[in-house]
Each structure stands twice: as structure tokens, then as C-alpha cells.
Amino acid sequence: MATPSTPPLSPPRHSNLPTPPSPTVKNDRYFANHPTLSLINQCTSTKHLKQVHAQMLRTGLFFDSFSASKLITASALLPFSSLDYARQVFDQIPQPNLYTWNIIIRAYASSPDPTQSHLIFLQMLHQCEHFPDKFTFPFVLKAASGLKAFRVGRVFHGMVIKASLNSDVFILNSLVHFYGSSGDLDLAYGLFMKIPRKDVVSWNSMITAFVQGGYPEGALELFREMEKENVKPNDVTMVGVLSACTKKLDLEFGRWVCSYIERNEISVNLTLSNAMLDMYWKCGGIEDAKRLFDKMLEKDIFSWTTMLDGYAKLGEYHEARHVFDAMPCQDIAAWNALISAYEQNGKPKEALAIFRELQLRKDAKPDEVTLVCTLSASAQLGAMDLGRWVHVCIEKQGINLNCHLMTSLIDMYTKCGDVEKALGVFYSAERKDVFVWSAMIGGLAMHGRGRAAIDLFSKMLEAKVKPNSVTFTNVLCACSHTGLVNEGRTLFYQMEPVHGVVPEDKHYACMVDILGRSGLLEEAVELIEKMPMVPTASVWGALLGSCRLHGNIELAEQASSRLLELDPGNHGAYVLLSNIYAKIGKWDRVSGLRKVMRDSGLKKEPGCSSIEVNGIVHEFLAGDNCHPLSKEIYSKLDEIAARLKSIGYVPNKSHLLQLIEEDDMKDHALSLHGEKLAIAFGLISMAPSQQIRVVKNLRVCGDCHSVTKLISKLYGREILLRDRYRFHHFRGGHCSCMDYW
């Protein structure tokens, strides 16, 4: 008996069917009413189809082109269809007719591998006696859209013109969609305007093109024109219009669109409901979103994830968790929404707790998004043990280390203190995009390796990788941290004329910091005065920080005033100015600023230091006594204080200027800063050979910096301290920053 894999090339000699004149009966419906073909419509599985296929082979019916096309249609397009099986069936047909070619091209155009659609099209050009028709081109154009194959699509467009099919509305609609998805809105709109009798698909294609091309205003204007032309919109139209409202964050018009849908009795399917839900959340219509979600009779994973993500981004984590627990199916997208919400909102501990839960429950397999979010949370906390574990998982599971993951790994290692490991990851990459280069340059900058950062920037240019805005922010920060003033100037003034990157406010802030830190305050002020845009809070903050370093009270007061005009709630401005006053002993002004802060309800960000020991991150606030080992920690602090005193160390009272940052502690406050508690805990919990790594959310104070240098010498320990701006590597009584910080 013939099988699907070994079909006969001609009908059996003893078939009851008349012998066709050739291997296929072309474009003939002679067997249209054959009882075997009626069985195709009754099939409910691929197994049933294969049984019909076998029967068609036995009878020779398979070699009739019309009959074969019926089988290929079912194999490729029915809900239970298998594209692999459909391809096997197609390859067995000796001379497929044009309809059959179109069916298999159409099936692949909507598949995960649309490239096959184009390959079969080329095969068709060589083997089919008929030229592609108006049904062929929409499918190959759809495949080109999915592949972002702009040049290939242009070739198809040329073929359409040569075949005189360029007035067909279906093909024109496909071309509008193709050019729109390729980002050429002008060409898409030009073709749209040439459509003589636009149907609803024409309007939908152009509306979608405008939305996807970042021109939501055009989409909404087109919708109004559509109304004037009396073309009745459908659910696809409204999805596009709602997406435009979402991009414009126009809640008022979005609500009007939802009422329009109801008034005009437009069919609301799940896709349209999800579009409304997404619009409400992203435009701030929280109560609208809740009401709609409760009314939805059908919900899919997108519906649930939208609600989950919405609550999480609002900081309503209890509600987000409630939605997560209520989900009928918690796929990896839902886990990612919860993990990323915590990670992106400054709650890395909670993000990692959710990741550990995912690992324990094994409901879903982590994907690239999960790993990127987990690496980012690890970087924020300085949790290198977990970050290393994720890296090992990536390698063991053979996950493709693309540029996105590569960037995350480099960021994690540099922020956790292992810049050499980050460099190892960087140099192992076969392909490096601008973000990978920028991440490594930024990592070197954080560790005070300014020369190395500039050298890497030069290598990036040699590799013909065009720097972007982030690259220059990172390389300018490297100059700032190491006092490379001339190099910073050169890079800054080369940005636009040499590299085509227009300096933004953040680049001006970096340059002001470079000049200010080195004492060139007048030049910094001149740069601010020449800025082509209004100086932002970050620019004035950079100048204020420089004034703190050099004790320039008059300029500090001006910078603080301008900063608070732009950002009245910026507690950092009060803190920096208070520090300047305290440094020169003007305590009456310190008290005055503290009163202003109290009266206005401003609270400074509390200082918090963390340390990872045996994979567990421990956090310490100033004067913290909540840790289970508090007694041992404070005993160690007493020991440290005694040893420091024995070598003549006296706390620098000028550093009491940090009182504002540490909740009004008394004279002994300096010994109770969080970083000192964390270091003491490290000394009693870690082996002498282990590096002590501490992460602080604020700038480390001068006294803690001095004490940590002495501890590194007295106890023979290597200590890494990461504050808000950079790393400090302490060893043998010295710091890598060379006291330039």
C-alpha cells in the first residue's frame, strides 16, 4: 500500500477512475462531488486527514489537482492542521495548480517561519505554468512584513506593477500594510491615496501603519476622515484607534471611542476588549479598567497580565499579587510582569523573592525577560551570588547570549564589584552592539578606571560601532570620576560635529561635574550660561555638588536656589547646602534649612547599606539594631573603635554635616552609619580571605571613607564599597578613588 512518504507517480492501473491524460487533471472539477472529498470536510484531526490521504492515494484521486488542493487546504489551514504534514502532502503533488501553490504560501506567511513562504514562491516561479495572481502577492507581502524584508517587498511591488495588478484593492491593501510595517509611512500613505475604492481593510491598514509608525495623530485624523466617507468601521479599526489613544495618553478621547463602539454596536471580541483595557490602564483610567475587566465574559492571558502589570506599576503590589494568584494560568509573561514591576520600581529584594518562588513552583520556564529582570535586580542589590547562578544557568541551558543578555550580565558584574568578570563576558562576545560597549564603558567608569574607559571607547570607534547618547554619558562620567578634564572637554565638544550625537542636558550635567570637581567652577558656570536648552535640575545639582567639594558658599546658594525652583521637593538640594554650611561651622544656617524641610514636610532619603553573605543580602540602616546578630555587630564596632583610637584616629566632626542624612543622630552617629554596621557584620561573618562588598544607596560620607581605609589596613581585608555614584576599592589603607570623589 502506498504511504504518504512514498506516493506513486501515477494512478494505479486497476483504478476505477478514468485514467487522466497527464499526471494531473489541471483546473478541472471532474471529481468535485466524489464521496472521498466530502470526508475531508468531516475530519477533526490530522490522523483523520492522513486516513483520507491514504484512501486518495489508493484510488488515484490524489493525482487530480482539484482533489489534491482540497486536501492541502485542510492540511494547512484547519485549526488542527500541521504545517509540516501539509508540506509533505504538497511535496507529493506532481503538478500543483496555482490555487495549491497559493495555499501553501499563505500557510507559511502566517507561520513562525515566513521565510519558507518566499522560498516556495521562488519554487513556484520556476515550476508552475501560471504566473502569480492577485491572491499570491498579498501572502508574500505579508511574509515580507513579518520578516521586515524591505528590499524583498519592493521586488514584489515591482512584480505587481509588471503584472498590471497594481490597481487591485487587495494587493494595494497589502502594500500599504507592508510599507507601513517597514516604517515608510510616506510611501504607505501615497499608495493608500491611490486606492480608487477604499474598503474598510484599506482604512484599517493605514490607521495601523500610522499607529505602529509612531504617528498616532495621523491615525486619529484618518479615523475622522473614514467617518466622513461613511465607511463603517469594524473591530480592527477600533483596535487601531484605541492604540492611537494609548500612545497619545488621551484618556478623554479613549473613553469617547469606547462609547462610540457601544453606540454603533461594533462587535466586541476579546482582542478589542483587551485593547480597551490596555488603553484605560496606560492612560490612567484605573477605575474604568477595573469595571471593564469585571464585565469581560472572556479573558485571556493578555487580559490578566494587563491588570497585573497595571496594579504593579501603580505600586499596588497587594492587588497585583491578588490578580496573579487568581489567574487560571500563570505563564512566564505573568511572572515576568510581577518580577519586572518590583525590579523597575526600586524593589529588587521583592523581585528576587518572586524569582525564587518561580524556581520552586516550576510552573513556567524562565525566558530572556525573566533573566534580564533578575540580573538587573541582582545588580541593584549587589547580589553577586545570585547573579553568578543566573549566568551559570544561561550557560548550562545553552541559552543564546544575545546582546540584551550580554548587556545585563556586564551590568550585573560591574555593579556587584567584579569588573574583571564583566570584562571576561565582554570580550567573549562574538557580536557587540552599542549597548554592550556602553555597558562596559559605564562599568569601568563606576570603578574609577577612567583611562581604561576612554581606551575602550576608542576601540569601539575602531570597531565601527556608532556611539549613542548613553555611550557619551558613560564615558563622560568616567572622566568625571578620575579628573580627566582635558579628555572630557575633547569628547564633549566632539559629540555633535564628529559623531552626530547632539548633547542633552545629562551630558551638560556630566561636563559641569567634570569642571566643577576639578575646581573650574567659573568655567562650569560659563558652560551652563551657554547651554542651548534651559538648565535642568541635574545640571544645577552637579554644580551644587562641586560647590560642596570646594566650599564655595555664594555659588552654592545660587545653584541651590535654581535647583529648588525647578524641583521644590528635591531634598538633596537642602542636604548638600546644609553640608556646605556645616563644613564651615555655620550651624545656625543648618538649623534654618532643617526647619524649612520640616515645615514643608520634606524628608531625606534614608541611608541604607547592604552586604551579601552566603547568598543572603543583609540590610542596615543607621543605628540599626534589628539584625539577629546586632549584639555581635556592635561588639565588633567597639573593637574597631578601640583599635582606631590606639593608632590616633579621631572622628572628623566636620562630617557631622551628614546628620541631616542620618536622622539627627548625636555625636556618636558617625560610628553608627549603615556602611560601618555592614562592614562589621562582614568581618564577623566572612572568612578572612573573602572580599567584603557593601552597597550604599547614598554617597558615602567622608568619615566612613576614612574609617574604611583604616579598617582595610588594620584587618588586612579587601573592602568594596559601592555608593550612589561609584565604587571604592579599599586595600592596605588606600582607596582606588585616590580621595577624588
Image: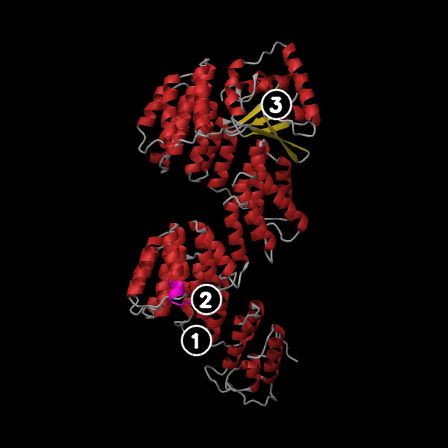
Q: How many marks?
A: 3
Residue 191 lies in the magenta stretch: no
Mark 3 belongs to which amino acid? Lys
Q: Which residues are magenta?
A: 260-267
Distance of label 2 from label 3 (alpha carbons): 71 Å
Q: In terms of sequence position, does the residue under pointer 2 or pointer 1 come before the other? A: 2
Image spot of residue 452 (x, y percent) = 50, 28
Q: Which residue is mark 1?
A: 129
Quadrant of residue 703 in the image?
top right
Q: Does the CB distance between marks 1 and 3 fall below 8 Å?
A: no
Q: Secondary structure at mark 3?
A: helix
In this rendering, is residue 179 above or below 604? Answer: below
Location of residue 189 in the rendering, given as x and y in whole percent from the top left corner: 31, 59
**Horizontal side, residue 405 vs residue 642: left or right:** left
- Mark 2 lies on a secondary structure that is helix
Nearer the camera: disc 1 or disc 3: 3
Query: Which element is circle 1 on?
Result: loop
Query: In this orientation, does residue 434 appear?
Result: yes
> In x, y percent, where is residue 489?
38, 26
- Residue depicted at x 66% and y 13%: 642
The residue furthest front is 599
Please report the residue visible at 60 percent of the width from the left and 85 percent of the height from the top.
59
Please tell me how crowded label 1 is: few (under 14), some (14-19), or many (20+) other residues with Cα within 10 Å.
few
